[in-house]
Image (cartoon, rainbow, N blue to C red):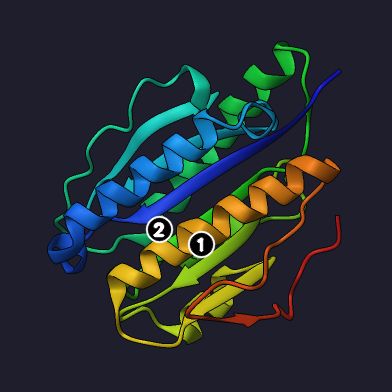
Amino acid sequence: MSLCLPTYVVIDASTSMKPHEAVLNATLSRLHYNLATNPRVSEFARVCVVAFSTDVHVVIPMSDMEQVPAMPEVICGGRTEYGKTFDRVRECIEQDVDNLARQNFSVLRPTVFFLTDGGPTDANWQNPFRKLVDRDWPRHPHVIAYGFGGARRDVLEQVATKALFIADGSDTESALSSAITGLLNTLIASSKTGQMQIATDVKGFEYVQVAQEYVD
């Protein structure tokens, strides 16, 4: 039975990202290309891409990236709604883990890569987040957060359960590219060992160990 890591790339597509929309889409295309051309990684890490702003859009549902012809374009605009994003990711996990198990995969604990350049615009996001990472829910995911631009470290310290990366500069486009590289390196390393191996050396980011890291 093959191991499978359900992977969620959850990326901020709010108005503050609009000036960086072209780079965001180019970076997501690079993510797709690197996964699609590395069969071992695409077989191990099944990937769902979610873009969030005022609404939440599943850009690519849980897929083997080798089977995805191209990354759809993401359009930026709207508020930075964390709560409904965490609700939607929880729904996806519930459905995706069942589907993967039916395909006879040995499903590892899901991992959410959360990339944002801003703080939440909704006041009550903590309740949906607590439901997502509730340890009484057998499918609660690891959350690895990357913050850049106007992202709030104090908020992301509450969101990250496994690792946190905070950009050490204000260049959003370089940070976005580096974050995707770090994400890819984590998936590549994890595919080699069959368990989560976080690439902690991410150019332009400070790696912050997370105090509430959950025990598997």
Q: Residue furthest front?
A: 37
- Residue 134 picture location, percent across and down: 69, 55
Q: Residue at x 86, y 18 (%)?
A: 1
Which residue position is annotated with label 2?
83
State which quadrant residue 178 falls in: bottom left
Tell how many labels.
Answer: 2
- Residue 87 picture location, percent across and down: 46, 47
- Residue 71 picture location, percent across and down: 33, 33
Counting residues from the N terminus, which is met first, the one under dot 2 or under dot 1? Answer: 2
Which residue position is annotated with label 1?
127
Q: Is residue 185 above or below residue 29?
A: below
- Residue 157 picture location, percent across and down: 57, 79
Q: Residue at x 74, y 81 (%)?
A: 211
Taking depth in this image into account, of 37 and 100 the one nearest to the observer is 37
Q: Residue at x 47, y 56 (%)?
A: 180
The kind of residue on which mark 1 rests is Asn
Q: Is residue 72 above or below residue 151?
A: above
Give the number of the mark in front: 2 or 1.
2
- Do residues under tags 2 and 1 come within 8 Å of each other at their CB atoms? yes
State which quadrant residue 197 falls in: bottom right
Q: Is residue 42 left or right of residue 22?
A: right
**How many residues crowd around disc 2 within 10 Å: few (fewer than 14), some, or many (20 or more)?**
some
Q: Does dot 1 land on a helix, a strand or a loop?
A: helix
> If the image is split into quadrants, where does the C terminus sit?
bottom right
The kind of residue on which mark 2 rests is Gly
Q: How far separated are the C-alphas under marks 2 and 1?
A: 8 Å
Taking depth in this image into account, of 11 and 169 the one nearest to the observer is 169
Q: Is residue 162 above or below residue 10?
A: below
Q: Residue at x 62, y 80 (%)?
A: 207
